[in-house]
Amino acid sequence: MRNTLGIVGRKIGMTRVFGPDGSIIPVTVIQAGPCPVIEKKTLDRDGYTALQIGFEEVPAHRLAKPEQGHQQKANCGFYKMLKEVRLNNVDEYEVGAALTVDMFAPGEKIRISGTSKGRGFAGVMRRWNFGGAPASHGHEQVHRKPGSIGQCAWPGKVFKGKKMPGQLGNKTATMLNIEVIDVRPEDNVVLVRGQIPGPKQGIVILNKLK
């Protein structure tokens, strides 16, 4: 994955706005940042370069003592969650400095990652879009079954990676080239075109592509 600057946000929901030509644009509203730099990861000490940033300030008593001790070194408050943003060069960022939605601009394309909605155990038709068995001509109680999953006597096993029923969703999903429609720094809000992974109030990470 490309090392680019980014911040953490929370998906508020979807709405629509009007474009300059009067067209209706479906958008997702994301409350993002401010995300202060809690720690800088360096190549000499950690083996890689990254910024550890905080999101959603909380009272100190909400954190365990080790977490309080780690975060108070930055002297910028205490935060509910910490995320790392990989960067090739962290020298221009200072511990305690806040990353905000100002880093994005309307019309810019960004990358957004989040955890997709968990759908529980699902069959092959829902999970993998299988066509299913015919609905007539002697078929009984097999209409949504996957059908044969193996071969004959040889090799006598089911190959790894076979599309089968199982857990659907609840995985990290990343969408590229999501267009930024509007940036509202006074509210720490970013509006992006279309939908993004995850439920309402879900945590997402917004990264610049360049």
Image: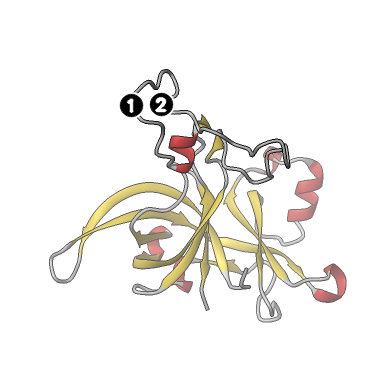
Q: Name the residue under label 2.
A: 143
The outermost residue toward the left is: 22
Name the residue located 51 percent from the left edge and 32 percent from the top edge.
147
Earlier sequence position, callout 2 versus callout 1: 1
Q: Which mark is residue 135?
A: 1
Q: Relative to the observer, which residue lies in front, 118 or 153?
A: 153
Q: Relative to the observer, which residue lies in front, 168 or 65?
A: 168
Tag 2 secondary structure: loop
Tag 1 secondary structure: loop
Residue 181 vertical position relative to residue 68 in the rendered view, above or below: below
Asked whether the residues under the numbered discs 2 and 1 touch, taking CB atoms below 8 Å apart as contact, a structural biologist would say yes
Q: Relative to the observer, which residue lies in front, 99 or 74?
A: 99
Q: What residue type is labelled 1?
A: Ala
Q: Where is residue 117 in the image (x, y as percent from the top left)?
A: 48, 40
Residue 27 sits in which quadrant?
A: bottom left
Q: How far apart are marks 2 and 1 (CA)?
A: 6 Å
Name the residue located 53 percent from the left edge and 51 percent from the top edge.
114
The outermost residue toward the right is: 45
